Amino acid sequence: LHYNLSPREVQEESFRRHIALAERVKKPLVVHVREAYDEAIGILRDEAAGRCTGVIHCFSGEWRHAAEALEMGFFLSFAGPLTFPRAAALREVAARVPEDRLLCETDSPYLAPQPFRGRRNQPAYVAAVYEMLAEVRKVPLEILAGQVWRNAERLFGWGDGNV
């Protein structure tokens, strides 16, 4: 809904179809929400999207959005914005997410983390996101990285022949 490149009704119907497809093919949803968390969470709830689960990619919502997504079985993934100086509220959310539902990512080529802001984002910069996430959760980086990897394996079925 952020750019309004197509009518709201078309976007919402497309989202509902995407949820149905994920459920039908038994694959997790990857949902990117930008400034439309109330609407997206409402549609996920209406469509019982927890049956197929998934990840809220590049999460930037409030705790109430995080709590609803977690209740439906979704993972939350954090990217470059977690490192932005004015993202204290987002860091507070990231600190509260259960460790078994946490993911970390890049949003290349966009949203480069500090200290790379203003540059084209690249996958190598995800290290800065991991470092910030480990800091706000008060865990060693190696422990966080292992947990995030296991979470990704579980969500996407890596290592069990479902890739």
Image: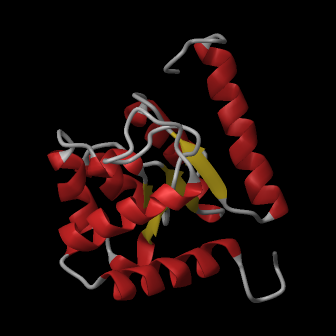
Classify 89 as above or below 143.
above
- Expressed as whole percent of the image width and height from the top left, the position of residue 19 reads 69, 47
Q: Residue shown at 54%/58% (left/top)?
A: 55
Q: Residue shown at 63%/63% (left/top)?
A: 51
The colour scheme is: secondary structure
Q: Residue shown at 39%/28% (left/top)?
A: 35
Asked whether, in this view, residue 73 is left or right of residue 96, the answer is right
Classify 87 as above or below 78.
above
Task: State which quarter of the image contains the C terminus.
Answer: bottom right
- Expressed as whole percent of the image width and height from the top left, the position of residue 147 reads 44, 84
Asked whether, in this view, residue 87 is left or right of residue 33, the answer is left
Classify 148 as above or below 84.
below
- Expressed as whole percent of the image width and height from the top left, the position of residue 30 reads 62, 52
Q: Residue shown at 23%/67% (left/top)?
A: 96
Q: Quadrant of residue 3?
A: top right
Q: Quadrant of residue 132?
A: bottom left
How many numbered marks does the figure carry? Answer: 0
Classify 151 as above or below 40.
below
Front-lying residue, 3 or 46? 3
